[in-house]
């Protein structure tokens, strides 16, 4: 146990402090461990975007695009920034993050704290101007908690961020913004996606990916995929966090109301949803390459490989960066090179 904390001293800090120091720690880790070139393994090209490797950071890790180049130097094959809301807003009041180290699970109810679309755009312009950042950048967009109109916030975020974004991830699956997941109901989703498609700035081909919830039945997921493919969505990120509550049994955080659970308990659910989505898309949209991004409970290099074998094009992580630290991407790359020697 002592050895673990000596190697991972951030686990000794209170969860919220460790979370808030994260961006500085990442910059420090990149200065010590960072590499000039992105590690290449299982490279792929999709819609003209070139991924040196298929492993990236999940939504929420770099909400405000403060560390995009550091994540590349630490070995990420692509970066997703956000969730970005059109206007700046703070985090939810009260306790917003907790963790249970032995069972490798996290709880959060941050609620889209964001510097806002304009600040994030400026940072991404700076990254792009550096010239050395040539991996894809996804921008995850959400709505301000004070906005009643669902479509207008997403449309505004797209308007501002299109010039710096290789793909948008439309986040309607966070459990931490009241009413957001209602948009996943078919009678809401169909008009929402249609309006979103028409709200895209003209003459841009920026693909839209939909980020999905794990808290749905298989039938509901298939219905969502069907509807979204019909509306012209280019891919899916699955999944977001599990809604916290007694239904999670031992995986729940009973002393916290609401919020989302990630890490180990999400692994089998996320894997199952990936398999289902792969099967459905292979039969319903065999004529086009719909991008599938698997996220949730990916904790080891073995987990990454398994998701790829199950049909994920790309894989993302959040919780394992808390439990294993920022060497994760370079460690997985090294494992891949050793395996393929
Ligand atoms: C502290 C925290 C903040 C998060 N913030 C966001 C977010 O802003 N947008 C989003 O789409 N997902 C967010 N997520 C969800 C992750 O992107 C991911 O879907 C989820 O954590 C499952 O992956 P994991 O088990 O590897 O953590 C957040 C997760 C955590 C733990």
Image (cartoon, rainbow, N blue to C red):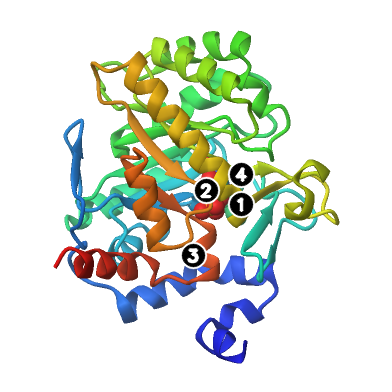
Image quarter in which the N terminus is found: bottom right
C-beta proximity under 8 Å, tags 2 and 3: no
Q: Is mark 4 within 8 Å of ligand 1?
A: yes
C-beta proximity under 8 Å, tags 1 and 4: yes
Residue density around tag 1, few if under 14, some if 14–19, many if 20 or more, within 10 Å = many
- Name the mark nearer the viewer: 2 or 3: 2
Q: Report, in whole angstroms, how far the alpha carbon at label 3 lies from the one at label 4.
A: 15 Å
Q: At which x and y percent is residue 133? A: 22, 55
The residue carrying mark 2 is 296
Q: Choose the circle earlier in sequence order: 1 or 3.
A: 1
Image quadrant where residue 209 sits = top left
The residue tagged with tag 2: helix, strand or loop?
Answer: loop
Q: Nearer the viewer, residue 189 or 177?
A: 189
Q: At which x and y percent is residue 232? A: 36, 15
Q: At which x and y percent is residue 270? A: 53, 42
Query: Which label was assigned to residue 180?
Result: none
The residue tagged with tag 4: helix, strand or loop?
Answer: loop
Query: Which label was assigned to residue 321?
Result: 3
C-beta proximity under 8 Å, tags 4 and 2: yes
Q: Choose the circle earlier in sequence order: 2 or 3.
A: 2
Q: Is mark 3 within 8 Å of ligand 1?
A: yes
Q: Residue at x 29, y 49 (%)?
A: 54
Image quadrant where residue 233 sits = top left
C-beta proximity under 8 Å, tags 2 and 1: yes
Q: Nearer the viewer, residue 279 or 131?
A: 279
Image quarter in which the C terminus is found: bottom left
The residue tagged with tag 3: helix, strand or loop?
Answer: helix
Q: Is residue 209 visible?
A: no
Image quadrant where residue 300 sits = bottom left
């Amino acid at each position: 146990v002592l050895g673990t904390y000596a190697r991972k001293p951030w686990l000794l800090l209170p969860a919220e402090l460790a979370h808030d120091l994260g961006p500085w720690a990442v910059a420090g880790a990149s200065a010590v461990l960072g590499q000039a070139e992105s590690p290449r393994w299982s490279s792929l090209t999709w819609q003209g975007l070139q991924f040196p490797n298929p492993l990236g950071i999940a939504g929420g890790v770099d909400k405000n695009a403060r560390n995009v180049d550091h994540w590349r130097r630490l070995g990420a094959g692509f970066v997703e920034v956000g969730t970005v809301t059109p206007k700046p807003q703070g985090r939810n009041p009260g306790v917003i993050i907790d963790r249970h180290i032995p069972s490798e699970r996290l709880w959060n109810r941050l609620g889209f704290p964001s510097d806002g679309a304009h600040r994030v755009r400026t940072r991404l312009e700076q990254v792009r101007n550096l010239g050395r950042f040539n991996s894809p950048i996804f921008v995850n967009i959400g709505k301000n908690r004070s906005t009643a109109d669902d479509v207008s916030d997403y449309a505004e975020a797209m308007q501002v961020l299109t010039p710096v974004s290789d793909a948008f991830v439309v986040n309607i699956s966070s459990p931490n913004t009241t009413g957001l997941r209602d948009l996943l109901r078919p009678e809401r989703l169909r008009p929402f996606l249609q309006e979103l498609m028409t709200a895209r700035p003209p003459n841009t081909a920026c693909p839209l990916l939909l980020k999905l919830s794990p808290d749905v039945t298989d039938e509901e997921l298939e219905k969502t995929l069907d509807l979204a493919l019909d509306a012209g969505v280019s891919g899916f990120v699955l999944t977001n966090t599990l809604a916290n509550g007694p239904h999670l049994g031992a995986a729940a955080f009973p002393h916290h109301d609401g919020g989302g659970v990630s890490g180990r308990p999400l692994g089998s659910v996320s894997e199952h949803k990936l398999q289902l989505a792969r099967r459905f898309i292979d039969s319903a949209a065999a004529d086009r390459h719909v991008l599938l991004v698997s996220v949730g409970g990916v904790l080891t290099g073995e987990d990454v490989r398994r998701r790829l074998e199950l049909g994920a094009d790309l894989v993302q992580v959040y919780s394992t960066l808390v439990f294993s630290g920022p060497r994760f991407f370079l460690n997985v790359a090294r494992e891949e090179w050793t395996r393929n020697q």
